[in-house]
Amino acid sequence: MATILSLISGGNGLLVALGAVLAAIVAAFFKGRSVERTNQKARNADALENHYKDVSSAADARHNVNSDGVRNDPYKRD
């Protein structure tokens, strides 16, 4: 404790203050990255859920199509 007080009381107070500011900036940067990563994971989970819903809807639509519709086309389109 005496060493820390001697650093602050001398002419090194500015260096200690700059070190504290630098540490705060680095901590804020890493906290922001963590929050952004969490948000990105949530967006990816929502996108994957929507994709699964689309695939499910497409699979359900396949069974609802009249399979005889192409053969009974009056305009003979293939």
Image (cartoon, helix red, strand yellow):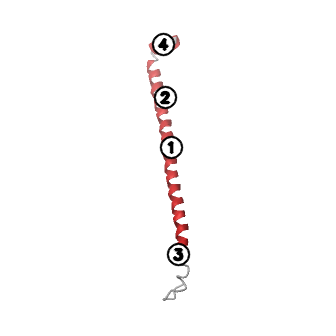
Q: Earlier in the sequence, mark 3 or mark 1?
A: 1
- SS assignment at label 4: helix
Say what amino acid the circle numbered 1 marks.
Answer: Thr
Query: Residues under labels 4 and 3: Cα distance?
Result: 81 Å
- SS assignment at label 2: helix
Vertical arrangement, residue 61 with respect to residue 13, above or below: below
The mark closer to the camera, 3 or 1, is 3
Vertical arrangement, residue 11 with respect to residue 27, above or below: above
Q: Earlier in the sequence, mark 4 or mark 3?
A: 4
Q: What residue is shown with label 4?
A: 5
The mark closer to the camera, 4 or 1, is 1
62 vs 24, nearest the viewer: 62
Q: What residue is shown with label 1?
A: 38
> What crowding class fits label 3: few (fewer than 14 Cα within 10 Å), some (14-19), or many (20 or more)?
few
* Image quarter of residue 70: bottom right
Spot the residue most to the top: 2
Query: Residues under labels 3 and 1: Cα distance?
Result: 41 Å
77 vs 32, nearest the viewer: 77
The mark closer to the camera, 4 or 3, is 3
Q: What residue is shown with label 3?
A: 65
Query: Residues under labels 4 and 1: Cα distance?
Result: 40 Å
Q: What residue is shown with label 2?
A: 23
The residue under the point 52% across, 47% down is 41
> What crowding class fits label 1: few (fewer than 14 Cα within 10 Å), some (14-19), or many (20 or more)?
few
Say what amino acid the circle numbered 3 marks.
Answer: Val
Tell me, for residue 10, which label it has, or none.
none
The residue under the point 54% across, 59% down is 52
Vertical arrangement, residue 18 with respect to residue 56, above or below: above
